Amino acid sequence: MFVSDCLNVNLRGHLTIGGCDTLELAEQFGTPLYVMDEATITQNCRKYVESIGTYYNSRGRVYYASKAFCCKEICRIMENAGMGLDVVSGGELYTAMSVGFPADRICFHGNNKTPGEINYALDCGVGRFVVDNLTELALLNTLALARNKKPSVLFRIKPGIDAHTHNFIRTGQIDSKFGLALETGEAEEAVRQAVALPGVSLTGMHCHIGSQIFDIAPFELAAEVMVNFMADMRDRHGADLTELNLGGGFGIQYVPGQNPVPYDRYMQAVSETVKKTCEARDMETPFIMLEPGRSIVASAGITLYTVGAVKDIPGVRTYVSVDGGMGDNPRYALYQAEYAAVVAGKAAEKPTETVTIAGKCCESGDLIQEHTAIQPVQAGDILAVFATGAYNYSMASNYNRIPRPATVMIRDRQPRVIIRRESFEDLVRNDV
């Protein structure tokens, strides 16, 4: 029934997370409320870190994709877990630096980094820039020389793999705002330019083939394509490429019936492809980097809501309105993302009602899930939506001037606030 091991039902029939009664959490901290289990997060980190040791002889590093969920406390947790950080904006970088995260363990991504962001990252001493395009390469070289720096650079490559249709079309992903294309010669031209530039040190390649992928084969094919490209660039341009970042995109279970492959199986299969291809091209196995985000934090989080009106339209549907919505979880409105939900105080009961969970925004598309099965529900009940630890808080907005929820982290059955609930005063703080 549940999509995470941190969820359970206590003797009162209430949903628990990290051993804490969700009704008590709702009463103590209010709703809407993001709740996350630290043990699940650290356990997921440990699996990835250990897999680098097992399959790559510890020659690699796992970078948490902070766009999934970014705040000061998650940066602290990642540092303690031995993780690196993947940041995609000056704001994410500032968050990491504000808690003293080691800059040499940060990769700076983004398809349109501003000069201000690049200068800030250079001043911070970030470990690697993942360069998206030729314009950025020239800009980074100029700014680095002005600061007497020579940052390590990886190029983001489009490996030509359509992981979502599983057709593995090698040219299918050329139409993307991210990265340099192999098919057009753009990626090779970037290498040719970079090896001659005095302000950057080209050390490797990066790719990311998509998100929420359940198959291993696309990752294996991407690894093969990338290693071969690296070997080609060595042979044609003398590029000394020693690092390979294979990105993220590992699928997680949002609803019952989804069966993601265990992460160590991904790691084992891809490592075998990397080693086999390196051997065939007479190339030393590169330093391997990964960038999981969703698969580390999504299943560790839930969102608690208080039910308001229950509106039954005979022969049509039943709307269950909650005190949040697309402001704190826009993923259903954006792309019909699947979620499972439960009436937290009746978690031991069977779901017997089919409802549409609606938010409070003045927007007809403000829905969290349609035609989903939950227990009998009435006004005042607490509703829990599962697997909201990724891309919920990080994509939240103040649409309709609704304050964003608080976030509570649980460790050893003790909840603590890691992001305060916004107030009405927060909403007007920057108004003039």
Image (tube, helix red, strand yellow):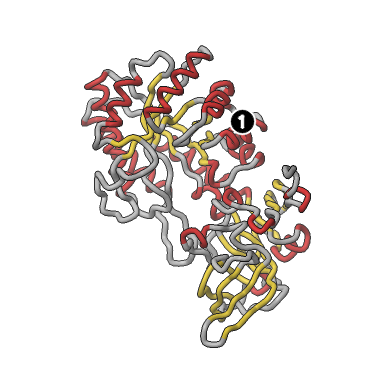
Q: Position of residue 77 (x, y in %)?
A: 62, 40
Callout 1: SS: loop
Q: Residue at x 24, y 37 (%)?
A: 183
- Residue 220 in the figure: left or right of residue 60: left
Q: Position of residue 203 (x, y in %)?
A: 38, 23
Q: On the rendered image, what quadrant is the C terminus found in?
A: top right
Amino acid residing under circle 1: Phe
Q: Position of residue 411 (x, y in %)?
A: 68, 49
Q: Residue at x 37, y 38 (%)?
A: 207
**Callout count:** 1
Please rate how many residues cluster around mark 1, counting C-alpha atoms within 10 Å: few if below 14, some from 14 to 19, many from 20: many
Q: Toward the viewer: 251 or 367?
A: 367
Q: Is residue 349 positioned above or below 366 on the image?
A: below
- Residue 32 shows up from this direction: yes
Q: In the picture, residue 59 is in which quadrant?
A: top left
Q: Toward the viewer: 31 or 422?
A: 422
Judging by the rendered image, the residue that carries numbered circle 1 is 101
Q: Is residue 334 positioned above or below 122 on the image?
A: below
